[in-house]
Amino acid sequence: MIVPKPVYEAMPVLYVAGGIAAISTVDSIMSFISGILLGLSGVVVLCMRRNYRAAKKAYMQDDTETHPPAG
């Protein structure tokens, strides 16, 4: 299943917002734990995406420096 790019990019932010909502609205220990897990999963996804994109950018820069375009 292909998710549209705006939805894909917004999902981790929605995870964090959902986690905050779960923690703040319901007075149950299960809601608190679920909110913490949901929020942490959003933060982890954001960090993983940032690290991947930085590594990809560095790789692409290294590739263009060692292999100049033909022409």
Image (tube, grey):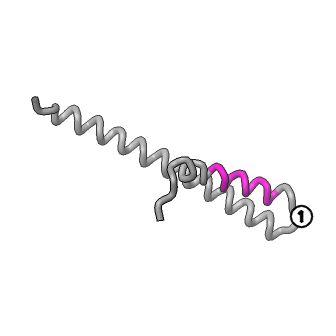
Residue 69, by quadrant, is: top left
**Residue 38, position as x, y percentages in the image:** 68, 60
- Which residue is found at the position 60% from the left and 53% from the top? 11
Magenta stretch: give its range. Answer: 13-23
Q: Nearer the viewer, residue 15 or 44?
A: 15
Secondary structure category for the residue under label 1: loop
Q: Is residue 70 above or below residue 27?
A: above
Local crowd size for mark 1, using a 10 Å CA cut-off: few (<14), some (14–19), many (≥20) = few
Q: Residue furthest left?
A: 71
The answer to whether residue 32 is left or right of residue 60 is right
Measured as percent of width and height from the top left, residue 6 is found at 55, 47
Which secondary structure dominates the residues rendered in magenta? Answer: helix
Q: Amino acid at mark 1?
A: Asp
Q: Position of residue 41 (x, y in %)?
A: 61, 59
**Residue toward you, 25 or 2:** 2
Depicted 61 relative to depicted 23: above or below: above
- Residue 71 lies in quadrant: top left
At 47% from the left edge and 60% from the top edge, which residue is drawn?
2
Q: Residue at x 80, y 70 (%)?
A: 30
Front residue of this view, candidates 11 and 24: 11
Whether residue 67 is situated above or below residue 8 in the rendered picture: above
For this orientation, the residue located farthest to the top is 71
Lateral position of residue 45 relative to residue 14, left or right:
left
Name the residue tied to disc 1: 27
